[in-house]
Image: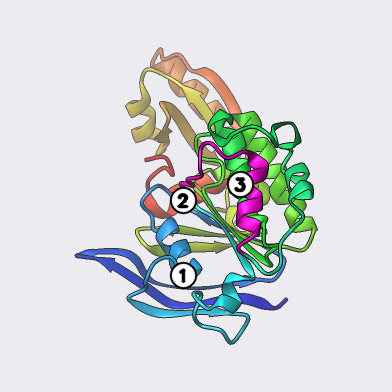
Amino acid sequence: MNNVIEIKNLKKYYDNTRAVDGISFEVRKGEVFAFLGPNGAGKTTTLEIIEGLRKKDDGEVIYFGRYNSPSDFYIKERIGVQLQNSAFFDNLTVFETLNMFAGLYKKSYNVKKLIDMISLNEKRKAKVKELSGGQKQRLAIAVALVNDPEIIFLDEPTTGLDPQARRMIWEIIIELKKSGKTIVLTTHYMEEAEQLADRVHIIDHGKIIASGTVDDLIKSLKKETVIVFKTENQKLFEEKFKCIIIDNKVELETNNIEKDMLKLLEFSKINNINLEDILIRKPNLEDVFLNITGRSLRD
């Protein structure tokens, strides 16, 4: 598979802070490539450098194997960008907004078809200020698509949205991939990366700390199951079984669920401790992040 973007030893500093600390990776044609990490990890800074919106301090950004300046007009014609915070004219309608952006390019997508693609047909005459958060986000994605780009950058495309609005955007991204588009997205939602990405690069403090397919990253844990429960005596279980505490729940990774569950129940009985809301789940990308950093993605 051809690489459409290559990043080599990219660096960006703010005073003494290393926002992007010498990262290298490639994006393959037709894939959904995800940067997963907590807020402040360096995801947006990296994306904005690649998009040509922010200057790098060192390193290389190479498009299509030969173009190393994202500010070149040739590159800008071939990429679409959805910013983390998009601002539009409140009193323009959805149709007028997309028509305005379409006029900036030599080649543009049919605006009516684009509105239909993002499921805003009923809102095409509505003013931007009348849209919900999810509808505005879909409009922002449509603006990124207006020039029919080969590569689409989506920066935290579902942050702050309710589950239904988030699911609608996931469906748009899935359809874009089916049409052959290359998609680079950032997210701090583990489930978003798991649902959408062909490959995931986990980033923390400006460094890539793990990369691979979702399956490969999870398999690297070498754990088959996670036991999750609630108790008022979290510290006791943390010390005895080397459990971890996430969102006020106790979690224990195990390769022998029957044996370890029996140990937990016996220990709770001996110490007269109640275990509540017990559930069994498979490991996920949050477990990968926790295993490497000792912190939750949400910390």
Label ID, residue 52: 1
Q: Check disc 2 and report the residue beneath it.
A: 289
Q: Position of residue 61 (x, y in %)?
A: 49, 78
User: From the viewer's perspective, is residue 219 above or below residue 64?
Assistant: above
Q: Earlier in the sequence, mark 1 or mark 3?
A: 1
Q: Which residues are magenta?
A: 85-104
Q: Position of residue 273 (x, y in %)?
A: 41, 15
> According to the image, what is the colour scheme of the structure?
rainbow
Q: How many marks?
A: 3
Residue 226, can we see it? no
Q: Position of residue 115 (x, y in %)?
A: 73, 44
* Residue type, mark 2 in image: Phe
Horizontally, is 39 left or right of 181 in the view?
left
Q: Nearer the viewer, residue 60 or 75?
A: 75
Label ID, residue 97: 3
* Mark 1 → mark 3, Cα distance in angstroms: 23 Å
Q: Position of residue 288 (x, y in %)?
A: 51, 51
Horizontally, is 293 left or right of 225 in the view?
left
Q: Nearer the viewer, residue 239 or 122?
A: 122
Residue furthest to the left? 16
- Residue at point 79%, 57% (across, down): 178
User: From the viewer's perspective, is residue 279 above or below residue 42?
Assistant: above
* Mark 2 → mark 1, Cα distance in angstroms: 29 Å
Circle 2: is it few (<14), some (14-19), or many (20+) Cα within 10 Å?
A: many
* Magenta segment includes 296: no
Residue furthest to the bottom? 66
